[in-house]
Amino acid sequence: MVDHLTLMTLHALLIAVFFSFLWKSDTHERTVYFWKVFGALVLGAIALGWLMYPFPRS
């Protein structure tokens, strides 16, 4: 069974690849932009989940 973190990371990977090819033309620029977007999506989602952890579920 695939867990939520794996699916979230796959989604971040696909979005980062799409945006890096859409907005950057040079290979080096694409690589740098890919890692920035991928890191922002994955680390941002983990940070948001960590911040929401103390709140009770309904």
Image: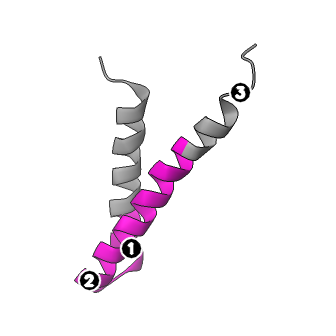
* Front tag of 1 and 3: 3
Exactly how many numbered labels are in the figure?
3
Residue beneath label 3, please? 54
Where does the image place residue 53, in percent across and percent down from the top left?
Answer: 65, 29
Q: Position of residue 46 (x, y in %)?
A: 52, 42
Find the magenta span and give its range: 18-46
Residue under the point 37% across and 24% down? 3
Q: Which residue is mark 1?
A: 33
- Quarter of the rendering containing residue 15: bottom left
Give the CA distance from mark 1 to mark 3.
33 Å
Q: Which residue is mark 2?
A: 28
Q: CA distance from mark 2 to mark 1?
A: 9 Å
Amino acid type shown at disc 1: Tyr
SS for tag 3?
loop
Residue 10's mark?
Answer: none
Q: Which comes before the other along the chain, label 1 or label 3?
A: 1
